[in-house]
Image (tube, grey):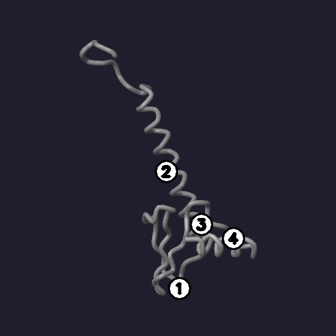
């Protein structure tokens, strides 16, 4: 994965938009580019012949925003916010 980070920084220096941190592009298949998270989980796939760097970066940013929204939603549930009254009448 260190190679992916180095490649991302090199491309960013060339003026191409950089992938957000914790994302990398799996280029192991010559026909398909796979956008992955740092934990190797799948985000999106693109045709190697038709993918634009901007489209890939946009997909990563959208995934990151969705992840943040999901974490915020889980945080609200865990803190007791957005919960209705306890039907049993007992809180504790």
Q: Nearer the viewer, mark 1 or mark 2?
A: 2
Q: CA distance from mark 2 to mark 4?
A: 23 Å
Task: Give the labeled residue for mark 2.
Answer: 67
Task: Give the labeled residue for mark 3.
Answer: 57
Q: Are marks 3 and 1 in contact (CB under 8 Å)?
A: no
Task: Give the labeled residue for mark 1.
Answer: 49
Q: Are marks 2 and 4 in contact (CB under 8 Å)?
A: no
The x and y percentages for residue 32 are 46, 81
Q: Mark 3 or mark 2, which is nearer the start of the sequence?
A: 3
Q: Nearer the viewer, mark 4 or mark 1?
A: 4
What residue is at 45 percent from the left and 84 percent from the top?
29
Q: CA distance from mark 2 to mark 3?
A: 15 Å
The x and y percentages for residue 42 are 43, 66
Q: Are marks 1 and 2 in contact (CB under 8 Å)?
A: no
Question: Quick one: SS at disc 2?
Answer: helix
Q: CA distance from mark 3 to mark 4?
A: 13 Å
Question: Quick one: SS at disc 1?
Answer: loop
Q: Mark 2 or mark 1, which is nearer the start of the sequence?
A: 1
* Quadrant in the picture for the C terminus: top left
Q: Mark 1 or mark 4, which is nearer the start of the sequence?
A: 4
Q: Mark 1 or mark 3, which is nearer the start of the sequence?
A: 1
Q: CA distance from mark 4 to mark 1?
A: 22 Å
Q: Mark 4 or mark 3, which is nearer the start of the sequence?
A: 4
Q: Residues within 10 Å of mark 3 (few under 14, many from 20)?
A: many
Image quadrant assignment for residue 55: bottom right
The x and y percentages for residue 13 are 75, 72
* Quadrant in the picture for the N terminus: bottom right
What residue is at 54 percent from the left and 57 percent from the top?
62
Task: Give the labeled residue for mark 4.
Answer: 9
What residue is at 49 percent from the left and 67 percent from the top?
36
């Amino acid at each position: 994965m260190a190679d992916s980070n180095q490649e991302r920084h090199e491309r960013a220096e060339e003026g191409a938009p950089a992938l957000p941190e914790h994302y990398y592009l799996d280029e192991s298949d010559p026909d398909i580019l796979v956008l992955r998270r740092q934990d190797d989980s799948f985000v999106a796939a693109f045709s190697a012949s038709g993918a634009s760097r901007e489209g890939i970066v946009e997909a990563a940013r959208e995934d990151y925003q969705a992840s943040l929204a999901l974490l915020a939603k889980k945080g609200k549930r865990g803190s007791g916010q957005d919960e209705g009254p306890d039907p049993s009448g007992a809180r504790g």
